[in-house]
Image (cartoon, rainbow, N blue to C red):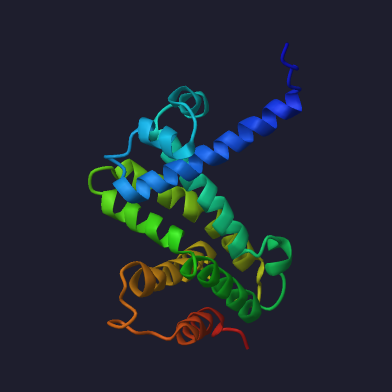
Amino acid sequence: MKPTKTKSQERELSAEKTTAILAGAMQEFLKQGYAATTMDKVAAAAGVSKATVYSHFQDKEALFKALIQKMAKEKCLAFYNNEHTQVLQGKPDIVLRNLANNMLDSTSRDQQFLAFVRLVIGESGRFPELARMFVQSFDRSGRELLTQYLSSCSDLKLPDPEATAYLFIGSLVNFLIHQEIMHGKHVLSMERERLINSLINLITVKIS
């Protein structure tokens, strides 16, 4: 008679299988593209049964969404250095420089993340809902935290902190797309420090 697993053991096993499924899904999505990836291929790549994949994720879209949310959480934590309450304290020029460097460091060196973004962009024409899901997951939390910080900086006297946060993050995303994702660093060369300095100057220029 097999020993009965405890609830803790079952949760741990389920978490391990979820991790394996997500890793298998990432492998297949990057290799096959969204349309050509099937739950059978994901199961084979993850080393689990198809039934196990479906017990964790309702369908392929749910699986892709889980990957987006997982990566968004990881990148947001890296962006704010895991302790956003500390990173978002201090003078604006220091805070913004730290945020910019954290964001670019955590993304430009992650080849899997860059490949995943290329996949989302490439599939956005046929599957716009995936692109919307990606934008919503990666944009909301980071922009909201930065908006709150900029709103609290009375010295900045910003008329629209949310638009400023959008401009700041959007400029860094644009830099990442041109330099890394679209392989344009030798075509549209721009020094990272030069960009960051210009963004900070634009935002903090009114501080006396």
Tell whether 72 sits left or right of 82: left
Tell whether 159 sits left or right of 31: right
Residue at screen point 64% across, 65% down = 149
Looking at the image, the residue that sits furthest to the front is 1
Which of the pair 34/161 is nearer the observer?
Answer: 34
Tell whether 105 sits left or right of 123: right
Which of the pair 157/30 is nearer the observer?
Answer: 30
Residue at screen point 75% across, 17% down = 3
Residue 77 percent location from the top left of the image: 62, 58
Image position of 13 with respect to 2: above or below = below
Looking at the image, the residue that sits furthest to the left is 126
Image position of 24 with respect to 11: above or below = below
User: Looking at the rendering, which quadrant does residue 195 occupy?
Assistant: bottom left
Which of the pair 78/45 is nearer the observer?
Answer: 45
Residue 184 percent location from the top left of the image: 30, 76
Residue at screen point 44% across, 58% down = 112
Res. 157 in view: no
Quarter of the image where the C terminus is located = bottom right
